[in-house]
Image (cartoon, rainbow, N blue to C red):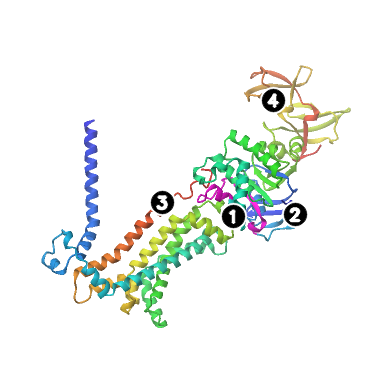
Amino acid sequence: MRRKRLEKTVLIAAKAAGLAFFLTLVLFPFYWMILTSFKPLEEIMLQPANLGLELARIDFEAYREVLFDHGFAGYIFNSAYVALTTVVLSLGLAVAGAYAVARLQFKGRNPMSVGILAIYMFPAIVLVVPLYVIFSRLGLRDSLHVLILVYLAQTLPVALYMLRGYFRSLPVELEHAGLTDGCTRWGVIWRIVIPLSAPALATAALYTFMIAWNEFLFAFMFLDTPEKFTLARGVVQLSSSVHLSKQLVMAASVLVTVPILVLFLFFERHLVRGLTAGAMKG
Amino acid sequence: MAALTVQGIRKRFGKVPALRGVDLQVADGEFCVLLGPSGCGKSTLLSIVAGLTAPDEGSILFDGRPVDHLSPRERDVAMVFQSYALYPHMTVAENMGFGLRMRRVPKSEIRRSVLDAARLLGIENLLDRKPRDLSGGQRQRVAMGRAIVRRPNLFLLDEPLSNLDARLRAGVRLELKRIHQQLRGTVVYVTHDQVEALTLGEQVVVMGEGRIHQADAPERIYSRPRSTFVARFIGSPEMNLYRGQIVHEKGKNRFEGPGFAVDIGRTQIPAGEAELGIRPEDIRMGGPEFSLTARVQLVSHLGAEKIVNAQIGNAPITFCVSKESRLQADDRVYLVMPPEGLHFFRNGLRVD
C-alpha cells in the first residue's frame, strides 16, 4: 500500500515538473515579447534583465508608434486582406475539388487524387526563384494579388487533402437521401456536406489563414513598395532598420501573434468531431 | 403514384456483374418485394430505379415513359435507407420537410404535411428533436416519415427493418402494411428476410446472382417455386431436395431417391432424372403400412412445433411434428409424402 502511494506521489511530481518545464520553454518567449512591448526604451536599456512588470507603468507608446508611425496599421490590413482572401478562395476551391475527388467518378480521378499531395512536396524555396522571374517579367510582381495566388497554390493541396479525407468519411447514404429528396449535386454539397464538415472546414480555414498570415519568404521576395507590405514582411523591415528599438519590434510581433491566437480560440469549439451522430443506425 | 417497368437492366462493378438482365413490372399502387440473399443485386436494382446508379444497359420506365435521362430529383421517388440516413444537423421536422422544401412547397403546407405524416407514424412528440436523441425504432419511423411526407411517384425501401430488434420488427411490419393500405403508393421493398417478403408483398420477386428467379404472388412463390433456388430460399426449415429418377411401371409412378422410393401418384412428368422436393411441414407420420422409414437423429423445439432431423435411405430429411410429439433421437418412424406436397425439378427448373 505504502509503495503504491509513494509511486503515485512520484508520478504526480514528475508530471508537474515536466509540465512546468515545457510550459516555461514555450511560454517564456511570449512573456518576454509582451513584457518588452509594454516598456519604454530607457527601461529596457537600463535593466535588460528585469522580468517584472509594474501594472502602473504599462506603456502603450510602442504600439502607437508601430501602428501609426511605422505603417503597421496598413500592414495589418494588407495581411488580413491577403489571408482572408486566401482562406475564402482556398476553401471554395477545396470543397469543390475534394468533393469531386472523394465522390464523383471521372477519368483521371486517381492520378488527380495522388497529384494533390505530390504538388505539396515541392519545397517553397525551389519555387520562389522561378516564380520571381516569371512574375517580374510579367510585371506583376509587386502586388498583393500575386501573393494571394502563390498562397493559394501553397495551401490548396493540404486543404484538398484534409477535406477529401473528411468527405469520404461522411456516410454516402446521406447524400443519396439528399439527391432523392430533390437536391442537385450543389444542393447536396451546400446543405448536407458543408454543414456536416464544419470541423474539417474550420481546421482547413485555420491552417490556410495561419500560412497566409505568417508567410515571409514570398512576401519578402515579391513586395517592394512599403505600402504593400504584409505584417511578417513589416516586422523584418522594422527589425532591420537602423534605429533598432526592441520595444517596437516586440510590439509588432505581438500584433502578428495575437490575431492567430484569437482565431484559434474562436475556432477551437468548432474543431470538435462527431457532428454526424444520429445519422445512421447508431 | 406510378407503375414501374424495368427492362433488361445490366450492371457490372468493375469485372463483377451485379445485374445480368433484369425485367420487372410493378403495377400502380402495388407493394413489390425484392427478396434475395445479400449480394444478389437487389439493392443495386433499387439504386438504379432511384437514379442514384446508372445501369450499363436497359431502361427504367414510370407509367410507360422512360426516365433514364432523369436525375433522382426529377424522378420524384422517395427512398428509405437501411441506415436511415437522417440528416444529423436537422430536427425531425426539418428532416421530414426537407424534400418538400427542396421542391419549394410553401412553409405552411410543409408544416401541415409533416404533422400529418408524424401523426400517421405516431411521432408528433419527436418533431423538435435531433436524430442523435432518438432510439433506433424512432429513427426508423422518421426515415419512413421523410418518405411518406412527399407523396412521390414511388417508394423505395432498402431493408428498412433490418436494424430493428425482432419484436419491434414485427410491429413495424404490420404498421407498414397498414400505411400502404392507407396511402396506396407503389412500393419497391428490398429485403433478405422471407417472412417480411411473404407478409408484406403483393408481388414477391426472388433474386439470386443478379437475376430474377421468380416474380409472383407470395402464395405461389411458396407453393409453386419455379426453381430449386427459389424452393430452397423460401420456407423455413428449408425444403428437402433429392436427386433421383422418375420411373413409370405398370401404371404406377414412383420416384427413386438415394436409398428410398416414393409413390408419386398420377403425373405427367416423363420418366428420367429429376429432383424431388418436399417441404418439412408437408411431411406426415404414418403407421407401419407405409414403406418410408426414417431414423431420427435430432429433435429441436421451436415452441409451436418441433423440427426433426432424420435419415431416410442415404439422405438426410427434415420434417415438422406437433409440439406434443414424444419423438426422440434413434427412434424409427414411418413417413408419408403426400403427392400434392411434392415438387419436381429438372436442371434446376420446375417441371410439373
Query: For the residue carrying disc 4, how many other residues have a C-alpha within 10 Å: few (<14), some (14-19), or many (20+)?
Result: many
Q: Which mark is residue B193?
A: none
Depicted B309 relative to depicted A69: above or below = above
Count the marks: 4
Q: CA distance from mark 3 to mark 2?
A: 48 Å
Q: Are marks 3 and 1 on the same chain?
A: no
Q: CA distance from mark 4 to mark 3?
A: 57 Å
Q: CA distance from mark 2 to mark 4?
A: 45 Å
Q: Are marks 2 and 4 on the same chain?
A: yes
Q: Is residue B205 left or right of residue A274?
A: right
Q: Quadrant of residue B55?
A: bottom right
Q: Is residue B68 left or right of residue A58?
A: right
Residue B87 in magenta stretch: yes
* Residue at which label 3 appears: A272
Q: Is residue A93 left or right of residue B314?
A: left
Q: Which mark is residue B63?
A: 2
Q: Which mark is residue B107?
A: 1
Q: Point out the stretch of residues depicted in magenta.
A: B71-96
The mark nearer the N terminus, 2 or 1, is 2
Q: Is residue B200 visible?
A: yes
Q: Amino acid at mark 4?
A: Cys
Q: Amino acid at mark 3?
A: Val
Label 4 sits on a secondary structure element that is: strand
| Chain letter of the residue carrying label 2 | B
